[in-house]
Image (tube, rainbow, N blue to C red):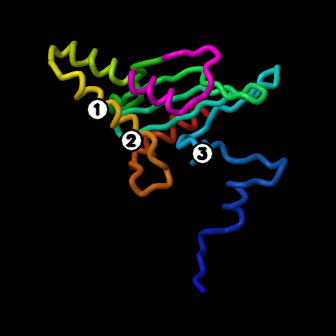
Amino acid sequence: MAHISNVSNSLFDSVLPTFGNPGTKLPVWDEGQKMFISSEYESAAGNRYYKGLRFCEQLAIVETVGLYHTWTYIDGIEIYTFDGRKPKLVGKRQFDKQFYNEEFIKGQTTQMVQDYMQGQFKLKNVRVPALRIEEQAKFVVNRSYTSFLSDEFDTRMKDMVPLLCASNQ
């Protein structure tokens, strides 16, 4: 039987600590939602909130989610592009009592990406057919739903971990 020398119980204990022991400050990957979860907290009223982050090569999407009693709401969506050094906010929407629905969020995100692209093309005085912009926006947003566990996931993770860890504190 092969012996793996660098995997020990302390490694597993850091990922799944026993109750009462602090865990690591790394964000959590949620395969079901296809996003990293960070900045979790509980309000005085007992409602829970967290930020979800998904990204691809061109953009990062941050969702602010609220868990109220038995309902899950989307409180806001932010879209960031990369300027080579850090993320740059290019779109933001806030919602009030909007039930969490993945298709609704994808639609809102796609529209925000389309609006951003149309604005950039207009600034550059470049005409691009609306259908082409819509197709590209859908493609980019769908890429952000790629599983982190997939071999297709981009290696931009080294650039994103600092952002994830910063929002987790």
- Please state the extent of the stretch shown in magenta in the rendering: 93-111
Residue 95 magenta-drawn?
yes
Q: Amino acid at mark 2?
A: Arg
Q: Residues within 10 Å of mark 1 (few under 14, many from 20)?
A: few
Residue topped by disc 2 = 143
Residue topped by disc 1 = 135
Q: Amino acid at mark 1?
A: Glu
User: Does 80 sit left or right of 51 as displayed?
Assistant: left
Residue at 43% x, 39% y is 144
Residue 34 magenta-drawn?
no
Q: Quadrant of residue 89?
A: top left
Residue at 55% x, 28% y is 63
Q: Look at the numbered discs 3 and 2 and tell me whether their residues touch, using CB distance below 8 Å.
A: no
Work out whether 74 lies above or below 162: above
Query: Looking at the picture, how far across and down is residue 17, in whole percent?
Result: 76, 53
Residue topped by disc 3 = 30
Q: Nearer the viewer, residue 111 or 87?
A: 111
Point out the frontmost of discs 3 and 1: 1
Q: Residues within 10 Å of mark 2 (few under 14, many from 20)?
A: some
Query: Looking at the picture, how far across and down is residue 124, in whole percent?
Result: 18, 16
Under circle 2, the secondary element is helix
